[in-house]
Amino acid sequence: MIRIIIGGFFLLSGLFALGIATLGMYRYSTMLNRVHVAAKCDTLGALFMLIGLIIFSGINFFSLKLFMVLLFLWLSNPVASHLIARAEVRTNTNLHEVCDFIEQENLKDDVNN
Amino acid sequence: MNDGLKKFLLDFYNWVTGNGARTENEDAMTELPPVLPFTMEPDKIQSRFHEKTLQERRKDWINLHGLSVFSILYRSFSIITCVVIVGLLLITVSELPPFGDENNPANNEVIDRYIKLGGNETGAQNIVAGMILDYRAFDTFGESAVLFTGAVSVLMILSAARRKNDEPKNKLHSGFNDRNFLKRAPPIHELKDDDAILRGVASLSIPAIILMGCVVIINGHLTPGGGFSGGAVLSTALILCANAYGFKKVHEFFNERTYIFSSSSALLIYALSKGYSFFTGANHIESGIPIGTIGNIFSAGLILPLNICVGIIVAGTLYGVYALFSEGEI
């Protein structure tokens, strides 16, 4: 019983985070904002969901597999979002119309100075 | 309240709302460097990159050879042929048996035999592996050969063009013999491959991915998976390595020679070990390797080596397709 309550709480939290991600995809208009929302909320939502499933299934081989999935998602999802955002920054020629940014070469010069 | 606290609170309020007096450092920091927008007149682009469209070139060719009547006939006959073929196919579709009917010709004694006797005859715990690599191994051989042939033909076209580029320039076709005709400039997002985040994650995850791929291939006759899926996993490890460390790093251990050698030898082993049954009337002849106990890794006769062969072919080919279309060479 208590396991179902705790697991359900985690599952609902994950659902909430993923719902916020879906809302953000429609709410924001620029690509970088969308990547930001999707990366953060997907990572947190996956964490909550998988923890909920681990609590449901108890400690066995299946929950170990779920834990490995969790590790892999936490490694890969932020990096993939980072790469997508980097490609956007480097290829979008009209980026200065959307947001303020400092060129990377100038940033390096500032650091060196 | 003393004056110092008041001043601090006022400063804090101004800092939050952002309309306080700025210091010189802040001004210097917020002055962004001027960004040059990408400008090019559209007429200039048109004149520089205008080529004759396919339609115009075809019209010129017909006028040159005086084939206007023939071209009209050719068009009408091609349309008639297409309509006839489509009509035949549609008639065939309407004659097909209803979907899901138990008296369909697809539900015959073959499925019964696979399910009842498949385990004992092939020795594979995974019935699907027993089917595709024992009963229907020649079909799987064709699939692997199709993959390999596709990659090799692209490789042949690209390498022929590269060899042409090395010859002295022919003035008539200078546009196609340009040294950079096939090697395009790298896209802007690939210019600097100094991403420390990607490298760190790649160094952590590439060994895990390779291990996963090997497990999927070797356990192909015991659990779901097999050569195709395991090979795809292995190829993602290669692609990730190429993205994180650059294609030069991959060329150190996997280049065109390695790819051709490994894939063609795997295909040859497959063909030699399974081709004999095709030449003897497609009879199911014992391979000579004992089936062993069902459930062990060393069981199921030829299925394990065939899985490894398919895995090698698929891993090399999927990586090769990625490398060919992004770099122009494996």
Image: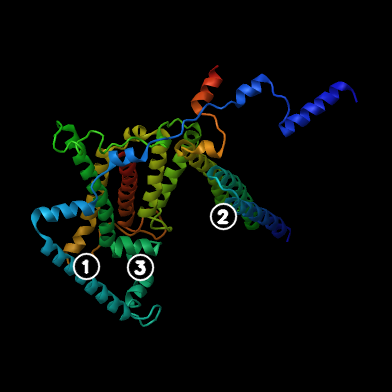
Residue located at (18% from left, 54% from top): B58
In the picture of the structure, the residue carrying the numbered disc 3 is: B118
Q: Secondary structure at mark 1?
A: loop
Q: Is residue B330 visible?
A: no
The quadrant holding residue B166 is top left
Q: Are marks 1 and 2 in contact (CB under 8 Å)?
A: no
Q: Is residue B290 above or below residue A82?
A: below
Q: Badge 1, how many Cα within 10 Å: few under 14, some, many 20+?
A: few
Q: CA distance from mark 3 to mark 1?
A: 16 Å
Residue A55: percent from the left, percent from the top? Answer: 65, 54
In the picture of the structure, the residue carrying the numbered disc 1 is: B283
Q: Chain of mark 2?
A: A
Establish whether labels 3 and 2 are both on one chain: no
Q: Residue furthest left?
A: B66
In the picture of the structure, the residue carrying the numbered disc 2 is: A62
Establish whether labels 1 and 2 are both on one chain: no
Q: Amino acid at mark 2?
A: Phe
Q: Earlier in the sequence, mark 3 or mark 1?
A: 3
Front: mark 3 or 2:
2
Residue A81: percent from the left, percent from the top? Answer: 52, 43
Q: Badge 2, how many Cα within 10 Å: few under 14, some, many 20+?
A: few
Q: Chain of mark 1?
A: B
Q: How is the image coloured?
A: rainbow
Task: Looking at the picture, tell me which residue is in the foreground, B298 or B31.
Answer: B31
Residue B79: percent from the left, percent from the top? Answer: 21, 69
Residue located at (28% from left, 40% from top): B47
